[in-house]
Amino acid sequence: MLVTGKRNLLTYTIAFVFILALNFLLPRMMPGDPLTAIYGDEALVAMTPALKARLVARFALDQPLWRQFGAYIAALFRGDLGWSYSFNAPVLKVILGALPWTLLVVGTSLILSTILGIVLGIESGWRRGSKIDRAMLAGLMSLNGFPDFFLGLVLLVVFGVLLGIAPLSGALTPYSSLSGQALILDVLKHMALPVAALTIAHLAGGYLLTRNTMITVLKAPFMLTAKAKGLSQNVIKYRHAGRNSMLPVLTMTGISLGRVVAGALFVELVFAYPGVGQLTYQALLSRDYPVIQGVFLMMAVSVLVANFAVDLLYPKLDPRVSHAH
Amino acid sequence: MLEIRGLRVSYGNDTVLNGLDLDLADGEALAIIGESGAGKTTLGMSIMRLADAGIQGSIRFNGEDIFTLSDEQMREIRWNRISMLFQNVNNVLNPVHRVLDQVAEPIVEHKLRSKGGALDRAGELLTRFGLPTERFSAYPHQLSGGEQQRVLLAMALANDPDLLIMDEPLSSLDVTTRQELGELLRNIDGHRAKLVITHDLDTASRLSEKLAVLYGGRIVETGSTREVLINPRHPYTRALIRAYPNMTTVKDMQGIKGRMTRPVSGCPFHPRCTQAMEKCSSEVPRLNQNHGRWVACHRGGIVTLLSVVNLSKQFNLLKAVDSVSLHIEAGETLALVGQSGSGKTTLAKILMGLYTPSKGGIYLEGKKVEKREKDFYRRVQMIFQNPGESLSHRLSILELVMEPLEVQGIGTKEERREKAIQTIGEVELPQTKTFLNTYPHHLSGGELQRVAIARALVLDPDLLIADEPTAFLDAGIGAKILKLMLNLQECRGLSMLYITHDVAAARKMSDRIAVMLDGLIIEEGPSSEIVASPRQSYTKRLLASASSLHYLDKTSVK
Ligand code: SF4
């Protein structure tokens, strides 16, 4: 366990440094003035020479590359991701304003799709070959083909426009100044459709994996042991078969996290949800490079952190892993 | 408490158990023994109603047919009344749960105790079966094979079942653990009925009082474990014991001819049986009681091929053979051991009809032998001490081997030729033209004896009498001849009367030994017993003077 942990920590550190370096180098390696690359043309036009000089000094752009990197890291540690001109606020603040909404949607749908995928997979695998199993398999396989934003659109049209039971956009009802329970309810209502879209889009992966593993696990000798012990069906199904079948899904969830985050960016656009996706879109429109870089950094780091969490969790669920080394 | 009738279990077209009957009483320890693929594990699974197969027949547990019970009722029986010590294969314990929890699980799930109470009991059981406390919270993969077996055992007894089924309980364990767990298993409380399923005779003999031999999906023999192992009555049981490496029997290990095949009409063993009759391939033999043993065989078990009753031969004043009674079973080797002048060769000559007995009778398959016709010689053949004397020098090798067929008038010339060449191959002689056309005086002693054996075997006899067949040969060549005879016996299911002065050779060659002195049989019994605990001082002397590697003996004794 310790060995695995250490090795993991090392891999993660390397990945983290790599991301930082990338974020640092990319704008600086573009042809032309790095300041232009970092801030974009429009921002520069509006700049006075004095401001420009201050910025050069701040990023140590007149210094050798390694010094620039030092300055960049130092700024990061101060929480300084730069200044957003289109929002006229520090990048960190802009991102932190949007991030909770994205975390809420991505986190909820990730948990939901994983749990639902596992449960459906267990039930389907348990009844392998039956009508229910085949129906589930066909249904989820066909859902799997649709991109998440498309599902979002369909949901929006059906529930938002046609049925009118869900809000069409945003994360909160504007100017309602709700509080307490009413606020929570409002938030839930607004996140329902984006979460549903993401959950459905990512359900099939976990389901298929669980179902396949389940079918293999059902043939394992310990399943016979469990039956011979006269355990009830649910104990056999979940404690013995299910528990062993969910392991690969967790690994998969960690791996597919990046995909879900990317998907979330699109889904947010569809629902005009004020999360990081929406922010990125706006930043792109106004070529607000510092924000885009900041988002890239944030996303990369959060995917990394989530993966690390799964890695820490896994040995607790599968005791064999901690002894693999 | 357990009563199985006409149990038929098949997976698709493959019928694994085919009309099996079995009874088990309270507190009884019964072992089911059989080769892998005989359906042993399927039987265990069927009793727990866990075999995922087509099932006919009935299994009554305390009077109730388990196939008529509801799933819920069956669930109550599982582990509470009937539990199973599973074969210790990989993943038989759930890899993601701690072993203590797995032992406690059935107690909790059957609501016998609270969670805490169940864990306490599980801990007690694990301790009783020798798992150290610090291993309780380990996961299965962290335990050694022996430790896993202890966990499985504790788990099997968790709910204090009335019937414990043990599937290969001692296999895959090292010798010391095997010894220790064998002891523990034998001593788990007496009221419990135990059903041991194993391919291993040693396990069966350690753990059971009664033994049932499973072959081709049926019980072919059952009786007390000790008796069945010492004196098997079914041809299959005997073959199984002969094929089993152990320290008790002294004869060389022999395989069982052929392979187990399914499905088979009639007696499941008939394709491999050396005493099969026509009826055997069409009619299924029932399990019948015979001499205190239950045997399923149309011939009542291993038949007595030849018996000699009260046979005497007097030359003037000398009683060469004095009231000798002996029998030889089909497929068995009896060694007749004695010094020269003990009368053993005279006895052989009487058997072959070269001397007429003064008194007594000889019976071939129960029929008294009066006049020896062609028929008798077709079934009983003899090879002599000195092949140089017994083979005519005017005939070529091929002619020599063909001669008995001609005398008996068997087959056409072509068929005889073919049969002879085939037999020459069987005794491991070259089948080349040059060799077939040579004359005996060109051959070595060992080759001559092989020709003599081929001559005897070409008629496919049931009994071969071999009188000191290696007396004129070097030790190395003689050993090869004996090896050949053992092989031939295994392939053909021959019976042999092996006459020798050499106890050491007799012990390797024979199932039983009869010791002859001054015309009398003074001692007779299974070879292992005669060798291990001779009763007569003469036998002891014979054994003491038998060739052994004394140097090795001394060092190993001290
Ligand atoms: S003699 Fe017939 S019934 Fe008896 S074991 Fe042989 S084949 Fe089966």
Image: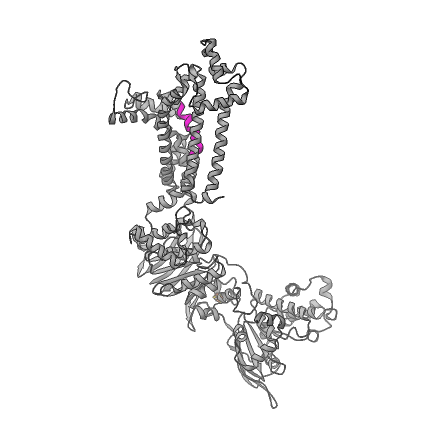
Q: Is residue B301 left or right of residue B128?
A: right
Q: Magenta stretch mostly in which secondary structure?
A: helix
Residue B531: image x %, image y %? 55, 74
Q: Quadrant of residue B493?
A: bottom right
Q: Position of residue A156 (x, y in %)?
A: 33, 22
Vertical arrangement, residue B104 with respect to residue B426, above or below: above
Residue drawn at point x = 40 percent, y = 64 percent: B186
**Quick check: can you spot residue B87?**
no
Say which residue appears at 52% left-offset and 14% top-offset: A33
Give the residues drawn in magenta, as a range: A253-265
Q: Judge by depth and name the residue closer to the eye, B193 or B343.
A: B193
Give whichever of B419, A303 is nearer the camera.
A303
Viewed as shown, does residue B504 lie left or right of A126?
A: right
The relative height of residue B257 versus residue A49 in the rendered view (above or below) is: below
**Percent from the top left, x then y, of residue B198?**
45, 60
Point out the image quarter for the N terminus of chain B: bottom left
**Could you tell me if residue B313 is visible in this image?**
yes
> In the image, is residue B84 above or below residue B436?
above
Given residues A65 and B67, the one toward you in this image is A65
